Every structure is written in C-alpha cells, then in structure tokens.
Image: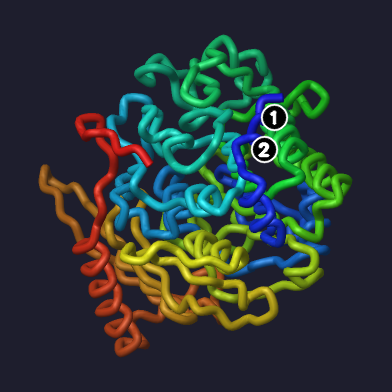
Amino acid sequence: MLFGSFASQRTTKAATESADRPNVIIIFTDDQGYGDLGCFGSTTIATPNIDRMAAEGHTYTSFYTACSVCSPSRAALLTGSYPKRIGMHQHVLFPKSDYGLNATEHTIADHLKSLGYATACVGKWHLGHHPETLPRANGFDSYYGIPYSNDMNHPANQNKPRMASDELWADQESCVTLWQTPLIENETIIELPVDQRTITRRYTDRAIEFVTSNQDQPFFLYLPHSMPHIPLYVPADAYDPDPQNAYKCVIEHIDAEVGRLMDTVRELGLSENTVVIYTSDNGPWLRFKNHGGTAGVLRDGKGTTFEGGQRVPCVMWGPGRIPAGTTTDAFTSTMDLLPTIAALTNTSLPKGTTIDGFDISSTFTSDESPRNELVFYSSRGTLEGIRVGDWKLLAKPKTKNKDGKTTTTVEHLLFNLAEDISEENNRYATEPEIAERLKARMIAADKEITANTRPVWRRTDTAVSK
C-alpha cells in the first residue's frame, strides 16, 4: 500500500505517547455553498451521510473562511493566520505562479507530525506547485492530488475551454480531451490530464487506504476535494445527463464518498478517538448557475465579502468529545482549527509566532466563542470590512468610468447579523457610532497584520527545509 511504510517511520515511544490523542480528519470541499447540505436546509440535494455526521455531531452556523477564494482560504486553514499575515492574500495561484506557502509556517500537519502523527494530504492543494511549497514541504508525509484548481492547465494555463457549460457536462470525456490538469503523487506528475470523472472516488480510495494503514497510531488526514469547483465531473454510476442536475450530482457523489470514509472509521473501531471536520473553502460560484451552488439565506457568494462568500457550512464529529445532535451559532473560523487541534492533543503551539486563530473547543458545549471579530479582505487582498460581535461593517470600493475618467468611491454597509443574516438592511446611516467604532477597529487590525506580515516562498528564494 502507498502509505504502508508510515508506521515503520514512527518510534514505538512516540506511538505510545500519542495513544490518547485523537485522529483528525479535515474534509474540505471547493466552492460549496451554505445552502448545499440537507443539514443546512437544502431540499433539493440529498446528503444523508453528512447529515448523519451532523446528527451525531455538532453543526456550526456562523463559521467563516478567511477569504472568499481558494488559495488564501486554504493557507488560513492550515496556518491559523489571516492570508495577509503570511503573504498569501493576493488572489489565487496559477500554473505560472512563482510563489507559494512558505515552509517556515507552522501548519496543522507540522504540529501533528511533531507529535508522532502520520500525516497525509489527499486532494487539491493550491498553495504552490513547486516542490518547496507542496504538501511534503509543509508537514505532510505524502501527497496525492491536483496542485491547483481543476480548471487550470499544465504548464502555463493556456488553451482552456469554457470553464463550465451544459456542453461540458454532456461530454464527460472532455476532462481528458480538453483539460491538461495534472495529478501529482508527492512531487511527481503521474497522470496528465487527470481523469476528473473518477478523482473524487480515487481521493476517497487513498484516504481509506491511509486510515486503514495507520489505524494503530495517531493520524491526520487532510482531504481537500477538487469538487464542486467547475468544471463538474462524476463517475458514470453517479451521472445524470440533465445539466440542470449537474451540481446536485457532484454534491451527492461527494456525500456518498464521505459515507465510505466514515464507514471505514466506524468499522475499524476508531470512532471514539477520531475527530472529523467537514467544511468548504468559500461560498458558491453563483455566476455558473446550475453548475454552481447556493448560499441559502445568505447574500451573494464566492469572490465577495458578503456572508455568502465566506460563511460556510461546517460539521464537527467526534463521539465522546463533541456532543451529538447539537447546533451552535458561535462565531468561529477555519483559522481556529489549528489552535483547537493543538488543544485537543493537549499541546502548545510554538512561541514567538503570531496567529489569528483561537481554541474553540469550548464551543462544543457552548454558544460562547473566544472569537469576537473577523477582518474581511477582498479576493485580491484589499481591506474591505470587519465583523465585531453581531455587527458587520463593509467598505466596498465602487469604480465608475465616465467620459474617459475613472473615479472610485466607497460604499459603506452596516448590518446586524443577529437580526439580518441576509444583509438586506443597511444600518450605516442610522448607527453612526457603531459604524465609526468598527471602522477604527478594522483599520487598526489591518495595520497590525500589515506590519507583521511574514514572507511567502518565492522561486528566487533559498529553499528552507524543515
């Protein structure tokens, strides 16, 4: 088996010392909206396996990513830091990008590997495709997946078809005739182009293999699925030719594969010592209509700082640690996962490095969260808003072109999310004191983050090995 040698790389002492520490699995989907699960209100998409996780675990209804697009969001999850703090805030990486996540950052994988955990990344990485930035440079023992989004072509991102269309859905073979997206094992391309019809299932096969091979020692599995990012593909047994059901097919296929993985955890007797977290990297790509998802009651979607862009579904499952059948509106974020996992393993994070996450293990049994604010940056890293408590301020630039002249103004929006989750009632004019308080805090928080930004890895840098 691919992962069969991991156990021999861990000492008996380390395995013994880690025996009471939970296994951790993070399932991270791509562009899945707040309204795309049964347990989050969907009446059109059947997700019985994820719904079962929710029934047996804890559902988070006020859970945020740190950005509304892929690369910054993934960087924040793994490092517990705002993307701007680690230089990963300026939109997404492409096949021609010459930078990526710096190996000096302390990731969830780094932390757990230092405790004797077996670590594997299976799925979409999108934090740099150069060897110095791929998963094995960032705490993972192995990697199997695509290095960037499934609508990107190796090596220079040229000659791409339309990213999503009913015609592409009808021609499922297009994934191996029109796209040149690579599949990587560790640092080597093993399939070009990757057959995207089977990739969700193959990710799950590898995930199950990893869990099975490491059932006798602590393990961390990071499973960032490529889907439902467009273009959409599924295996033949999950395919519905009606393009109106394209997105539905993909989510239901993901749900079935989640069920396979969860069944493995249960059948191996690992339930009482495993924590599974299911969430999405950002909101749905609404402009692709039936190829995109829904934000449910939230406003807008991917690429925006409205709630639909960054508030995402989240389910945490951990029998014996996380109460079953419970829901919380506690203010939480993907940035909180690193310190929370450190707390679950009774360990401390390295001193001297500032992060922006909090230990939210208290929210397993309470609606009170240590997080009280979240700074919002645009998809290209521009400061655009802040939430403090129930209040959210947005300062959105608006550019107009008239008579050859370009002018930029700022539209201010203020919402009370406890009363107005859909962001329909702008209170900026009627609550000037609250608006000014949030504006001042937004500027101060961004000033601190900017002053303490850490560098990304760049191709001209000297590679730093861990």
- Most extreme residue toward the top is 177
* Res 183 visible: yes
3D distance between C-alphas at marks 1 and 2:
7 Å
Q: Amino acid at mark 2?
A: Ala
Q: Position of residue 217 (x, y in %)?
A: 70, 47
Name the foreground residue: 198 vs 113. Answer: 113
Residue 63 drawn above or below residue 225: below
Q: Position of residue 436 (x, y in %)?
A: 27, 83
Residue 3 drawn above or below residue 51: above
Specify the quadrant of the image occupied by residue 439.
bottom left
Q: Horizontally, is 440 left or right of 434 in the view?
A: left
- Identified at 81% across, 40% down, the residue is 260
Q: Amino acid at mark 1?
A: Gly
- Most extreme residue toward the front is 13
Tag count in the figure? 2
**Residue at numbered disc 1:** 4
Name the foreground residue: 339 vs 65. Answer: 339
| Figure colour scheme | rainbow
**Residue at numbered disc 2:** 7
Q: Horizontally, is 281 left or right of 10 in the view?
A: left
Q: Position of residue 205 (x, y in %)?
A: 74, 30
Residue 389 drawn above or below residue 332: below
Q: Quadrant of the N terminus?
A: top right
Q: Are marks 1 and 2 in contact (CB under 8 Å)?
A: yes
Residue 254 drawn above or below residue 167: below
* Res 380 visible: no
SS under mark 2: helix
Circle 1 Cα neighbour tier, 10 Å, few/some/many (<14 / 14–19 / ≥20): few
- Identified at 46% across, 81% down, the residue is 389
Q: Position of residue 153 (x, y in %)?
A: 44, 20
Q: Which mark is residue 452?
A: none
